[in-house]
Amino acid sequence: MKKIFVPLKRVPDWQLKVKPSADGLTIDQTNLKWIINTFDEIAVEEAIRIRDKGVGFTEVVLCMIGPKEGSEQLRSALAMGADRAIHIITDEDIDSSQATKILAHIVKRDNYDLVIIGKQAIDSDSGQTAQRLSVRLAYQQASFASKIDVDGESLTVVREVDGGLETLKLKLPAVVSTDLRLNEPRLRSLPGIVAAKKKPVEEIPMSDIPDVGSKKVKVRKLSVPPSRPAGQKVSSVSELISKLKEEKLIG
Amino acid sequence: MSSILVYIESLGGQLPKSSLPVISAALKAKSVLSINTVIGVLIGGQGTDEAAKLASEYGLDKILFIKSENAENYMAASYASVFAQIAKDNNSTLLMGPASSKGRDFLPRVSEILDAPQASDVIEILAGYTFKRPMYAGNLIAEVELEGDIKVLTVRTSAFPQPEKLSVSEVTEINIPVLKDENSVFVSYDTVKNERPELGEADIIVSGGRALKSKENFESVMYPLADVLGAAIGASRAAVDSGYAPNDWQVGQTGKIVAPKLYIAVGISGAVQHLAGMKDSKVIVVINKDPEAPIFEIASYGLVGDLFTVVPELIEALKAAKL
């Protein structure tokens, strides 16, 4: 009876351009649309597929750290087919080290065998939580997974690395972080959405979690990167060649 | 006395060009933060002593290396525990390494072992332990301050220059045991044979997208273009997902971040996540038949046309220009 734990983060929709807030300390909150972090959604999909293979995993449990309104994204992930969820409620913006401490607390409390988590959140782009969690739990680690095969007590993971693909074999318990090509998350079905409304969600105020520590990564300023100087259209290959010669890029 | 510890990635007895900018970043941190000592660290199997010698020519204060059979194949847990131990032994307060697949994999472990904050993918080092780094797929640049006795960085190597050859530093082998964990076993590393320059090192990159329509087209159009320019080949996520090119060639926020002298984008529409990986290239040439493609907005030179006629024409013209 093994259980899979999938942490989720609620992030601004990547299809809408984010802007800095007036004080430059966060992002402009007007007209934001929230989604499940792309890589975490892949993690939910993979967890459900592993459970449904009938290789000893019986439950997929989701965990979101975030404000009350995040329950919308949490229900949407439950609608994919996860069994239940834990919602750590806070309005605070925490760093990777704090998130790790919270998630580790829950994993230890409930004894999960496998943690599948996105390789990075597409808002902060830090890419630390999976690896930190592996250390804190003393679980085996495989990051940037593009293929996971489960075989009883062990996992074979193909990782996307510089230069090609690496394969690791890990004994459970383990933390695996997902890369883009691991799978394509399913669309929600109507019965799935209906069922999700009745699935149990345990709400825990963040203040109930011990030893979260203080935030040590502080954003002092957000700004829009300088834009490139306007370019020009060329009308033919020969014009392009003469431009590249002017730039001394070709002989 | 505190020190900066910088991980330098070696490959056999070699130091790939892409592993050197992290040295420039470390020297920059040394002057900005007024830390006395910068120590370079190499970890690996056979040839690591040779690579350490090569790394000693760039003005770091000291080079330490670990050469161990158990480090021949990279494993996150063993590299992290060794690196954290060296940091403790040298009273290091700033730890850094490249945001390569290894650096991104093991440095967050080091951060957790030392209970230290980390800034990922740093592009600029400012005073007061404040660092510039992209967030939101490069749509915003953040200045983040790290607080704590020990701080950890991964560095975006394309944002820092190649280091200059300076004074030669002392090279010392250290004997911290590299432990193997039987519960994590390296099975294989499958690399794509590639005679062309690496993406992270190339002065010129030609990159193909979905509009190439097939693996065969990708090969027959992009390979000869790369060959005539001596360029590396990149690909959009769509092209990689469709199997036109191997995963290691993907340029973008979640693939390789590159900043070559010349980037030629062929049949790439310009999704935000692709632009995040190449918009710092010096000159960007765009070839696309859709004049509305978003990638034209960042092009230095845009040519609207069918890639299947434009690229062969370009190859002939480049051959002629070389004569």
Image (tube, coloured by chain):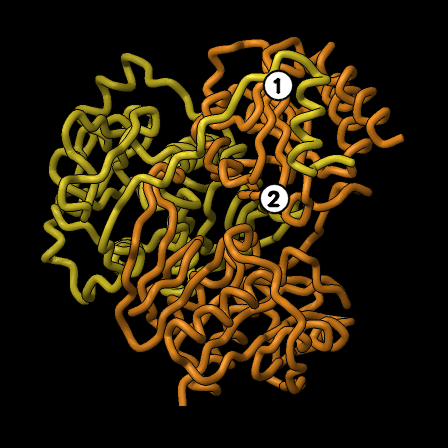
Tell me: A51 left or right of A85: right
- Horizontal and vertical percent position of residue B186: 66, 57
Q: Amino acid at mark 2?
A: Val
Closer to us: B166 or A211: B166
Closer to us: A180 or A27: A27
* Residue located farthest toward the right when viewing the structure as drawn: B323
Which residue is under mark 1? Answer: B287
Q: Residue at x 67, y 33 (%)?
A: A246
Which residue is under mark 2? Answer: A158
User: Where B72 falls versus A68 (above or below)?
Assistant: below
Q: Residue at x 18, y 35 (%)?
A: A28
Are callouts 1 and 2 both on one chain?
no
Q: Which chain: yellow?
A: A
Q: Quadrant of the C terminus of chain B?
A: top right
Q: Residues within 10 Å of mark 1 (few under 14, many from 20)?
A: many
Q: Amino acid at mark 1?
A: Ile
Closer to us: A238 or A22: A238
* Residue located farthest toward the bottom when viewing the structure as drawn: B1
Q: Give the colour of chain B.
A: orange
